[in-house]
Image: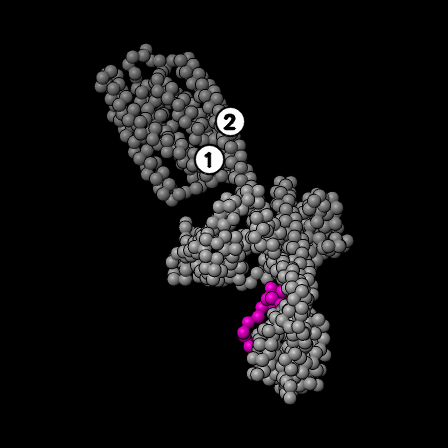
Amino acid sequence: MEQRLVAFSKTPVEEELVGRVAWQIQLRWFAAAGVLVAAWFATSLLDIPLPSGSLYAVGLAILLYNAAFWFYLRQLKRQSASEATVFDRFAKVQTGLDWLAMILLVHFSGGIESPLLFYFFFHLIIASILLSPRACYVFATLAALAVAGLALLEHSGLIPHVPLGFVGPGLYRDGLYIAGVLFFFSTALFIAVYLATSVTINLRRKDKALLDLQRQLASAYQRIQTLYDITRTVTSTLNLEEVLSLVAKLATDEMEVKACSVGLLSDDGRMLETVSAYGLSDGFLASGPVEIKANTLTRQTLAAGQPAIVSDVAADPRLEEAPQLQAEGIRSVLCVPLEIRGKAEGLICVYDSAPGRFGERDADFLSALASEAATAVINARAYHALEMADRAKSDFVRMVTHELRSPLAAVQSMLKLMDQGYVGPLSDQQQDLIQRSQRRIQFLLALVRDLLELAAGKMEQIKGEKKEVALGELIRKAAEMMQATATEKGLDYQVDIRDEPLVLVGVEEGLERAFTNLINNAVKYTPPGGSVAVRAWQEDGSIRVEVSDTGIGIPAEALPRLFSEFYRAKNAKAIEMEGTGLGLAIVKDVIEQHGGEITVQSVEGEGSTFSVKLPQRPSQAVPGTG
Amino acid sequence: MPKKILIIDDDPDLTEVMRLTLEGKGYEVYSAASGTEGLGKVKEVHPDLIILDVMMDYTTEGFQISLQLRNPAEDSEYQPYRDIPILILTALHTTTPLRFGPDEDYLPVDDFVEKPLEPGALVAKVEKLLKV
């Protein structure tokens, strides 16, 4: 029993056996020393007439064979021997030699009269720890027989009796005494073996249970880890193919099976298409989508919403495609439905070459995987729908804007034609009305342009190419463009762009427009005599830009809505009637699309400061471009 | 003899604005409301300058006409017209996902005029291309 237990495990139990053998060898050093000391004590100090030479010889023999054992164990350890039977045999050899030594010691210390007899008990207890119960009974029997044999031989005078001197002479010849000692000695031995082994059997059973538990725990942990990996992928990517490929691979690895496939129902629900597979041959996969109607197992599993287990492909009537599966070397199949919003919309199947491979626990695990895969499908579908909706919306806005622009541009062109006298002279009143019309059209055109830009900004494919942008240079240019206006207004206009690389990866046009907007606003809304400052620098790996002014400021109630589309603060309207209210919305959109953030601090009547923080291009910044 | 200008644009109002502007400067103006009609007029009139709207029936119609005129195949009937200067009429870049550039291979035209039209700017560009 012990052997089977040990052979079945590599680690804990066997390590314990090695440990116990080592412990036995260690104890034996003391035992041998004890024999030598006791022999000397008894013969020299107590003057008991024992054959000291023989006793010393036995003690030395024990030392000797223990040294041999110690050496052998070291060899075993060095070879990292893992064969449990080797240690088992080793333990038996040790016990056998100990028995021989014990019998000799008993013989040299009075035979049946020897108090050393008691020492058999602790030997038996050690044996019960080291050996199987059966071996213990064998050794107990051997001990009883050996002592009986010794007593008989001494009694019959076939071998000499060593008298102890302090017990009554001739006790070893007393039949009743011998019978009594033998009876109690033997029964005590067997009772001791029985008690000791029943304790160790219990311990070993617990060891085994613990070991099993440990294994189950490790396997459960591994499966949880697998599920966690998948969950993480599901939440970190919207790439359905990637997630499902991972599901197929992890299911195959974790369940230690031949292959796995993930299939999804077609839109009309009539076909099951394999979207991801692992471990299956190209030839097998080339057979294409499976018609649900023609495939009993698929149909039933989808309809029942329950796992289906095929123990033997050849014998299962539900598998119409059995020949193909067999050709692929598949004998067992486990399929679980992939449920999306309570409806089975696909299947995950695992395949193995051994028949009867799958059980309930496998089904549970695969079902858990399936529910993760289902989440991935839901996410990917939702994202796709969103993307389509977003694109449709942007296309619509772009189309509408174009339709709005064309007539406006035509009207504006005609007004200009009149205004500039190409079609004859105008009266002052006519000229005034035409100029007013032009201003209103101008505003509408600006609005349409901003709307278009906002829509375009939200639509990735129009955003333009991403490349390295030297932001310092870009801001300097934007600031220069406003220099004339600022001077005209008599503003104190400070531009402080630090001479350090302020480089990021982004869309130049968008960034240019964003910063131009911010600087224009500052100049526009600052009364003559005020000041405007544009600063850019590098801080903690980010690019910081600040545009501050001593302008009209932003009313507190306007701050929360400042970056909203079509919003304009009242005091801004008072300065310029025709703003579209889209400028800051565009700025915010651009900054955020570059992974940055924009904040504003302002006191009405005192001024505003817009602060932009943008991520510096990661690593290898190009020097001298800032 | 006055120089001949062909306007290819599907917007009749803008066409009218350009006609009035250019006729005022003494040019002979012809117009076509579609690409096909425009190509027919090119052969018929053999203009000295073509003003072409980028977006007509479909987004890239103007581009295709300019390519057809500028890079005609060896045996194309448009071979005689490949040197006529082309002025492209466009809304802002942002109207279309197409991008413009000075690259001859990409968009073989000579100059751009933006909508809404500034009559003075139109006249200036026309004069520049006709080397008046």
Mark 2 or mark 1: whose residue is earlier in sequence: 1
Task: Identify which residue is drawn at 60% across, 76% down.
Answer: B123
Q: Is residue B4 magenta?
A: no
Q: Main secondary structure of the magenta part?
A: loop
Residue most extreme to the front: A428
Q: Is residue B61 visible?
A: no
Please tell me whether residue A500 is drawn above or below residue A334 in the rendered image: below
Please tell me whether residue A76 is drawn above or below residue A296 in the rendered image: above
Q: Chain of mark 2?
A: A
Q: Please identify the quarter of the rendering in which residue B49 is found.
A: bottom right
Q: Residue A614: x and y, percent?
A: 48, 53
Range of residues picked out in magenta: B90-105
Picture quarter with the C terminus of chain A: bottom left
Q: Is residue A439 visible?
A: yes
Q: Which mark is residue A13?
A: 1
Left or right: residue A40 versus residue A369 is left
Residue most extreme to the bottom: B1
Give the residue number, with chain letter if any, for mark 2. A202
Residue type at the position of mark 2:
Asn
Q: Residue A432: x and y, percent?
A: 65, 64
Of residue A439 and residue A327, the one placed in the foreground of this image is: A439
Q: Chain of mark 1?
A: A
Residue type at the position of mark 1:
Val
Label 1 crowd bin: few (<14), some (14–19), many (20+), radius 10 Å: many
